[in-house]
Image (cartoon, grey):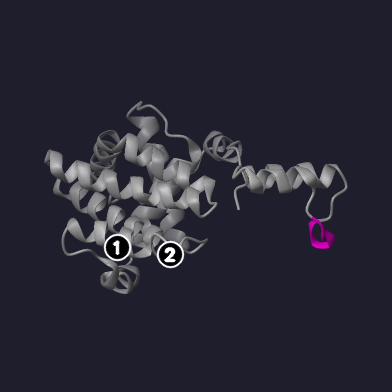
Amino acid sequence: MDAHAFRFHLLALEHYISEERLLRLPGDKSVYLAGMIARQADPGYTEQTEDFLLESPEQIDLFVRSHDPYIGQNAPIVTVSRINAERITLDLAKKRREAYSYELRFAARLFGIASQYSYLAGNRTLGEIFYFLRNHFPAVLRLLQGYLTFLEGRADRPQQIERASETMWERLGRQRNERNEKKEAWEKMGINLKKKAMISPAELGGMINFTSEN
């Protein structure tokens, strides 16, 4: 993904939401949507992911059944469901029409599958993002449709969009990062993760009770 394109879409999306006085997305959701738009606009990325696209909705059920036993940090079902959900979402947004109910349901279901298996793979952050997109899919699609129209109307003056406000960066910077919070808490307790060789009783209990992320 082009880093400049990602940065541009992040600023532009925030600018659009602010200008239209729309309800602000949580920062991590804005970051994800900006990345999704940048990825789908990258010809190299779309070419690389062609082999992951489903030919019919029924294929996802077969894929879930065949990959269900192989869950891990790089579970293939997460990749396949995410790529297809993103492609369908952007295709619908570009059409600028009311999506049919079956299109909405299928895209939302793909995000739901990505959420479920992200949680199972121990990636709670992505799981929460996909869960949000699944539960608010019609609203997210309307937001993206409006955003693409907004971009077209300002295609001749992108520099106005790129002037990021300090408020926007501060808002994104305040977003809760679970991994960083945990790391900072350990550092305050004097725990050096690089030298940590034993599992604490609390961690062991979490693993046994399936409450640990990993």
Q: Amino acid at mark 1?
A: Phe
| Residue 61 image point, x, y percent | 25, 56
Q: Secondary structure at mark 1?
A: helix
Q: How many marks?
A: 2
Q: Which residues are magenta?
A: 193-198
Answer left or right for 53 relative to 119: left
Residue 120 highlighted magenta (yes or no): no
Name the side, left or right, on which 181 lies relative to 68.
right
Q: Which residue is mark 1?
A: 63
Residue 109: x percent and y percent? 28, 45
Look at the image and tell me whether residue 183 can be seen: yes
Q: Is residue 86 left or right of residue 132?
A: left
Q: Residue at x 20, y 53 (%)?
A: 91
Residue nearest the viewer, comparing 207 with 166: 207
* Residue 40 visible at all: no
Residue type at the position of mark 2: Asp
Q: Residue at x 47, y 35 (%)?
A: 26
Q: For label 2, count other residues whose C-alpha is less than 10 Å away and answer few (under 14), some (14-19) or many (20+).
A: few
- Residue sitting at x 16%, y 45%: 103
Instruction: Write down the quadrant of residue 23 in the picture.
Output: top left
**Secondary structure beneath label 2:** loop
The quarter of the rendered structure image containing the N terminus is bottom left
Q: Answer with mark 2 or mark 1, whichever residue precedes in sequence.
A: 2
Q: Nearer the viewer, residue 86 or 206?
A: 206
Closer to us: 112 or 14: 112
**Picture disc at residue 2:** 2
Left or right: where does residue 156 sit relative to residue 15? left
Q: Few, some or many C-alpha atoms within 10 Å of disc 1 (few <14, some 14-19, many ≥20)?
A: some
